[in-house]
Image (spheres, helix red, strand yellow):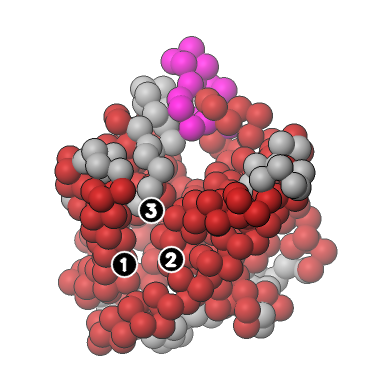
Amino acid sequence: MVDQRTKSFYRPELDSLRFLAFLMVFLRHGLNTEIAFIDSLALAGTFGVCLFFLLSSYLITELLEREESVTGTIHLRAFYVRRVLRIWPLYFAALLFDFVLQHFMSPGIFTSSRLIAFLLLAGNWYVSHHGYISTLSTPLWSISVEEQFYVVWPSIRKYFGRRTSIAFSIVMLVVSFLALGIAIDTWTNSFVQFQFFSTGALLALALRGRIPHISPAIRLLLFAAGMLALLNCTQYFPHVTRGFSSSSFPWSALIYLSINVGCILLFLSFLGEPRLGASRLLVYLGRISYGLYVFHWICLRVAVRALRHFTHGYLPKPLTNLFEILLALCLTIACAAASYRFFEAPILRYKNRFEFVRTRV
């Protein structure tokens, strides 16, 4: 391994991994060919959310580590300002737009109580108790989970040091698995999902800024093994997302462990791979992946409605779905690119003022 700890930190290959995580989620929500094997692959895309969580935690923990190394401490105020500038503007804009849109299109669907829950970054708990609705903000429950974790984690790292932070991460892993035995809806339960943040943090703390030397052949094997691990979990999909019975706790823990291992393998297959970091297209798509995630649900709905009159009854289901997917992906990329260029990037320029370790915008 080579120590890469400097006053700047940017791993472009991990932007490519961000795009992979998004693409997994996108295909999960849009792919419906009625071909068993292909649809099983789409189900595995559900776990792209877990990959997002692990990657986010690794990156933020690594930045905290580097900040302490460079400045001697972790600046909590600066951390939260950076976090607010990166996540909140698009998140709240999408929520409010969705609320107003549904008020005119489908009154009563997006209730005031749902809006308040999401505004308070407790949307995942609301979904857990009241279910999903098919609107622009449907996928945004995961933002609540992420923000909840980051309320606690930087303070743990700052005030309790590396060893206690490692112990805390391990304890959170245990708590996450124990939560499987009592959670009604495991998928949107914060404590269940915290295992992926804990794993990402442990990876950053263990690697200490070093990049492992892995041959291309081994990387390919890691990638294949990671995808296979996730694909194997799809046969238990209803239980993974809706919860297991208390009597099947050991089995549920094994399934979630398999999801976690799959995400670790995918992460390691990308980390330090220069060719993935050299792909301008993949890196750019990873850079705008937050917008891709926010806009993809509504773009999928628009694409389905737009093509319904042109393909209904004329093309087989798999081909129709392929056209829907391609149109939705183009629309999603266009929306995310415009959002990043004209809305997110101007705000992110202020984020640079609060950085102690330089990153890309």
Magenta part of the chain = 240-255
Of the numbered discs 1 and 2, the one sitting upstream in the chain is 1
Q: For mark 1, what is the residue?
A: 90
Identity, as a three-letter code, of the amino acid under mark 3: Leu
Q: For mark 3, what is the residue?
A: 136
- Of tags 1 and 3, which is closer to the observer? 3
Extreme residue toward the top, this view: 247
Rounded to the nearest angstrom, the CA distance separating label 2 from label 3 is 14 Å
- Residue drawn at (27%, 60%) of the image: 97
State the residue in front, 12 or 140.
140
Q: For mark 2, what is the residue?
A: 290
Residue 51: x %, y % from top left: 53, 53
Q: Secondary structure at mark 2?
A: helix
Q: Mark yes or no: residue 109 visible.
A: yes
Q: Is residue 336 above or below residue 169?
A: below
Identity, as a three-letter code, of the amino acid under mark 1: Leu
